[in-house]
Amino acid sequence: MGSPRSWSRLPFVYRPRAERRESPALAALYWGGPTPHQSHVANISSTGAYLITNERWKVGEILSLSLQRAGTLETANQRHFTVQAKTIRHDRKGVGVQFMMPIGADLRLWRSAGKTEVPQNEPEDVVREFRLAMAVASFQHISAVAADQANFLMRRGLSNFRLESAIEIALHANELLALQTDGQRLEADPAIALRILEDGSWAEADWMQHYWASVLPPPVGLPRLSYRTRSSSPCSAR
């Protein structure tokens, strides 16, 4: 499995408990040694989940959980999502956790990202929604002015095929931002950032998606697009 996504520039927030449902075959993987352990997710909501497991983590302990369909370890980005979670309770059957999602990550489980309102309960639907919510939160740091338009574009304006590409572009761009150490806070021009997101969503190959992502954050000391320094942002460094 690839390394977890870096969210070093996105502050985390807790939310009130939301509706919990079952998602067939959804599993959570965690590492307690050289190989991952896999637990069944009994139910999950936009704020947390209950795991069937023999583990008894301490209340307040922070876990790194990878959500995917139960079975073989997934390596493709589109097939799994790593989320930070805090243990809030445990009993004889398992452990309850609360997700630590960044401010701006509007997780909408059980609601379709497309134009249909049919609930999306499969593990792949859950993973896609986590990736989508994180992509929207990431875009707020890339260009806060265009965040609402990017949210609408990814949730309503793109086909499922193009959506996956747009999500990967936004997430990879955030990873590149996290690597910058010059300390300067820059923001992409909203019109250009949206154009990159929309045009880049047609890219099928991973390398092409990552190329589009590379032109969203500014290179250190050499802005490639139109950027401006900002004094404040809804998504700041932890």
Image (tube, rainbow, N blue to C red):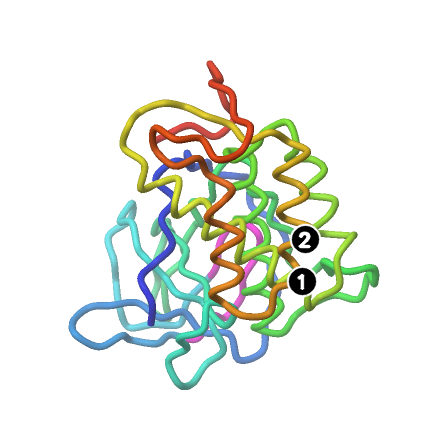
Contact, mark 2 vs mark 1 (Cβ under 8 Å): yes
Helix, strand or loop for the magenta stretch, by majority: strand
Q: Which residue lies most toward the right here?
A: 116
User: Horizontal and vertical percent for residue 36?
Assistant: 27, 74
Question: Which residue lies at the image location 49% right of the left edge and 67% below the top edge?
Answer: 206
User: Horizontal and vertical percent for residue 46?
Assistant: 57, 52
> Is residue 160 found left or right of 168 in the rendered image?
right
Q: Which residue lies most toward the top here?
A: 231
For badge 1, the amino acid type reads: Trp
Distance from the alpha carbon under mark 2 to that under mark 1: 6 Å
Magenta region, residue range: 40-49
Q: What is the quadrant of the N terminus in the image?
A: bottom left
User: Horizontal and vertical percent for residue 153?
Assistant: 73, 47
Question: Which residue lies at the image location 55% right of the left edge and 42% below the top edge?
Answer: 105
In the image, is residue 224 part of the stretch drawn in magenta?
A: no
> Is residue 192 found left or right of 36 in the rendered image?
right
Judging depth in this view, the residue of 203 and 87 nearest the camera is 203
Can you identify the residue that label 2 sits on?
A: 199
Q: How many marks?
A: 2
Question: Which residue lies at the image location 39% right of the left edge and 65% below the top edge?
Answer: 66
Q: Which residue lies most toward the bottom here?
A: 72
